[in-house]
Structures are given as structure tokens and as C-alpha cells.
Image (cartoon, grey):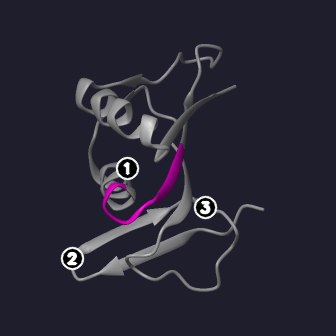
């Protein structure tokens, strides 16, 4: 059961998740959550919302499932920059991030 869009804010730290699993009634900074994020870009860097979410799960626990365009997409597969690939490789073995491709 995927939840609605969730916003977590504390001081200057903010990100908006596309979805939060389990549809929690309230999001509390510092608690672990299962986030889902969808990115349909040609190239994806370790910046902005995605970077903030990865930092959050690394610090507080939880998991982020990120969906990117696959090679079957009419505009081609999303290319991940080196820093983003490195962060995913560091967090994936710890169960904190999974990458999926669509379609």
C-alpha cells in the first residue's frame, strides 16, 4: 500500500517524496520511512530532492526505492552520474536504496 506524497521539513532540510509506503498519517523527522521516488530524466545527478532523501535514509534509516527510465523508454534509459552511482553502490548493500527501471 503506497501512501500519498509526503513532505518532511526541519529547519532548512526539506524534501518531498513522491510516495511513502504505509500511508503514515504524519511524517516525523528522524523516523525511518520507505520512500518511493520517480525520476524521468535523461541524466540524473546526485542533487536536490534525491540527494536529500538519500542523506535522510543514510542518517535515520529506512529505504528509498527510485524509479528511472529504462532502455525501452522512447527517449532512452536514464544515465546516472558517477557520484549518484557511488552513493547507490554504498547504500544498496545496506538495504537503504533500490533502483528500478521502467518501462
Between 60 and 13, which is closer to the camera in this rendering?
60
Query: Residue 44's image quarter?
Result: top left
Rendered residue at 66%/63% (across/down): 21
Q: Specify whether 103 is left or right of 37.
A: right
Between 41 and 35, which is closer to the camera in this rendering?
35
Contact check, label 3 and label 2, Cβ < 8 Å: no
Between 27 and 7, which is closer to the camera in this rendering?
27
Q: Is 59 a magenta residue?
A: yes
Q: In the picture shown, does residue 11 fall above or below 2?
A: below
Rendered residue at 70%/25% (across/down): 103
Judging by the rendered image, the residue that carries numbered circle 2 is 12
Query: Residue 75's image quarter?
Result: top right
Judging by the rendered image, the residue that carries numbered circle 1 is 50
Span colored in magenta: 58-65
Rendered residue at 31%/50% (across/down): 51
Q: Residue furthest front?
A: 94
Q: In the picture shown, does residue 49 fall above or below 79?
A: below
Q: Specify whether 2 is left or right of 18.
A: right
Give the class, few, some or many, for how many residues have Cα within 10 Å of label 2's Cα (few <14, many ≥20): few
- Residue 101 visible within the image: yes
Contact check, label 3 and label 1, Cβ < 8 Å: no
Q: Is 63 a magenta residue?
A: yes
- Residue 39 visible within the image: no
Which comes sooner in the sequence, label 3 or label 2?
A: 2
Kind of element beneath mark 1: helix
Query: Residue 29's image quarter?
Result: bottom left
Q: Specify whether 26 is left or right of 13.
A: right
> CA gap, disc 3 to disc 1?
13 Å
x and y, in percent, of residue 5 in the image = 59, 68
> CA gap, disc 3 to disc 2?
21 Å
Amino acid at each position: 500500500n503506497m501512501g500519498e506524497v509526503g513532505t518532511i521539513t526541519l529547519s532548512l532540510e526539506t524534501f518531498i517524496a513522491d510516495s511513502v509506503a504505509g500511508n503514515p498519517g504524519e511524517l516525523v523527522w528522524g523516523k525511518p520511512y520507505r520512500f518511493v521516488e520517480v525520476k524521468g530524466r535523461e541524466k540524473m545527478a546526485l542533487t536536490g530532492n534525491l540527494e536529500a532523501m538519500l542523506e535522510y535514509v543514510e542518517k535515520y534509516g529506512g529505504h528509498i526505492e527510485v524509479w528511472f527510465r529504462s532502455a525501452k523508454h522512447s527517449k532512452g534509459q536514464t544515465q546516472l552520474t558517477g557520484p549518484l552511482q557511488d552513493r547507490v553502490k554504498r547504500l544498496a548493500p545496506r538495504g537503504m536504496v533500490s533502483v528500478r527501471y521502467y518501462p
